[in-house]
Image (cartoon, rainbow, N blue to C red):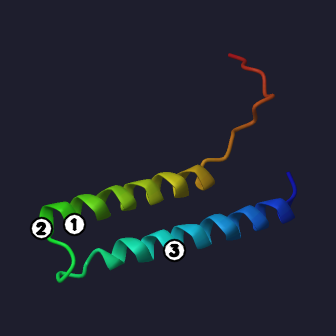
């Protein structure tokens, strides 16, 4: 896969994520929704965890896959 394809997909997916995060922020309107701190903490806890997991995938580089094991 080319770097152009990566850029195209990354921009599309990040923009979709930003849009959805903004929609989550809209839930903060107390005139429209009732919620408590536990619910809010759960939402942002899982979002943070998923972001950390995705970021770690970029940091984890496959080691020499074709390297043979020797003792």
Dot 1 surroundings within 10 Å: few (below 14), some, or many (20 or more)?
few
The residue at the point 62 percent across, 55 percent down is 58
Q: Earlier in the sequence, mark 3 or mark 2?
A: 3
14 left or right of 51 in image: right
Task: Describe the element under mark 2 as helix, strand or loop.
Answer: loop
Residue 44 place in picture, x, y as percent:
30, 64
10 Å crowding of disc 2: few (<14), some (14-19), many (20+) = few
Q: Position of residue 37 (x, y in %)?
A: 13, 68
Tag count: 3
Name the residue carrying label 3: 19
Q: Residue furthest front?
A: 32
Nearer to us in this view, 60 or 21: 21
- Asked whether, in this view, residue 49 is left or right of residue 20, the answer is left
Circle 2 residue: 36
For the residues carrying marks 1 and 3, which lies nearer the camera in this image?
Answer: 3
Instruction: Give the quadrant of residue 11.
Output: bottom right
- Label 3 and label 2: CA atoms lie apart by 23 Å
Callouts 2 and 1 close, C-beta under 8 Å? yes
Please give the residue where the numbered disc 1 appears in the rendered image: 40
Horizontal side, residue 39 vs residue 58: left or right:
left
Q: Which mark is residue 61?
A: none
39 is higher (above) or lower (below) than 32: above
- Identified at 38% across, 61% down, the residue is 48
**Which element type, helix, strand or loop, lies under badge 1?**
helix
Q: CA distance from mark 1 to mark 3?
A: 18 Å
């Amino acid at each position: 896969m080319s770097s152009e394809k990566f850029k195209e997909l990354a921009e599309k997916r990040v923009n979709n994520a930003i849009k959805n995060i903004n929609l989550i922020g809209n839930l903060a309107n107390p005139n429209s929704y009732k919620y408590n701190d536990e619910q809010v903490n759960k939402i942002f806890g899982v979002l943070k965890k998923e972001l950390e997991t995705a970021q770690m995938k970029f940091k984890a580089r496959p080691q020499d896959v074709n390297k043979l094991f020797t003792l």
